[in-house]
Image: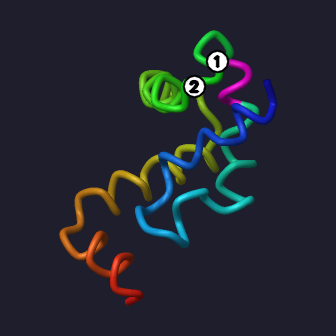
Amino acid sequence: MLTAAAGTVALLAPAGPAGAQGTEQQRLACMTDAMTLCAGDVPNTRRIELCLRRNYARISTPCQGVLDAARTAAASPDTMGAARYGR
């Protein structure tokens, strides 16, 4: 169960080979929140991410930062190209 929750941040990290798995810091930032608030959604990482977003006000500040950064990266048109072309 912990391994599945640890993969949660894979969807929160910027796209591309380097960000596909998320960093250890990103995984750790949300693991406790995922296990506490979203245990019923494990191992479905997409459902865990949606659960964390639904419970944004209840999750830890570090996990909020990861979610915010993922949203900003997803909104940036340069994110995909930069990751894809190594920029």
Q: Are marks 2 and 1 in contact (CB under 8 Å)?
A: yes
Give the answer, above or below, for where 27 lies relative to 72: above
- Residue 73 in the image: state x and y as whole percent: 34, 63
- Residue 58: which numbered mark, if any? 2
Q: Quadrant of the N terminus?
A: top right
- Give amino acid for label 1: Leu
Q: Earlier in the sequence, mark 2 or mark 1?
A: 1
- Residue 53 in the image: state x and y as whole percent: 44, 30
- Would residue 3 appear left or right of 34 to someone viewing this image? right
Seen at 42% across and 22% down, the residue is: 54
Seen at 48% across and 23% down, the residue is: 47
- Residue 20 in the image: state x and y as whole percent: 52, 60
- Which quarter of the picture shows residue 80? bottom left
**Residue 20 forms part of the magenta stretch:** no
Seen at 68% across and 30% down, the residue is: 33
Which-is-in-front pick, marks 2 and 1? 1
Disc 2 from disc 1: Cα separation: 9 Å
Q: Quadrant of the C terminus?
A: bottom left
- Give amino acid for label 2: Arg
Most distant residue in the right direction? 2
Q: Would you name the residue on which mark 1 appears?
A: 37
Region of the chain picked out in magenta, as a range: 33-37
Give the answer, above or below, for where 86 lies relative to 64: below
- Would residue 34 appear left or right of 68 to someone viewing this image? right
Seen at 41% across and 87% down, the residue is: 86
Q: Residues within 10 Å of mark 1 (few under 14, many from 20)?
A: some
Q: Secondary structure at mark 1?
A: helix
Query: What is the number of callouts on the image?
Result: 2
Q: Secondary structure at mark 2?
A: helix
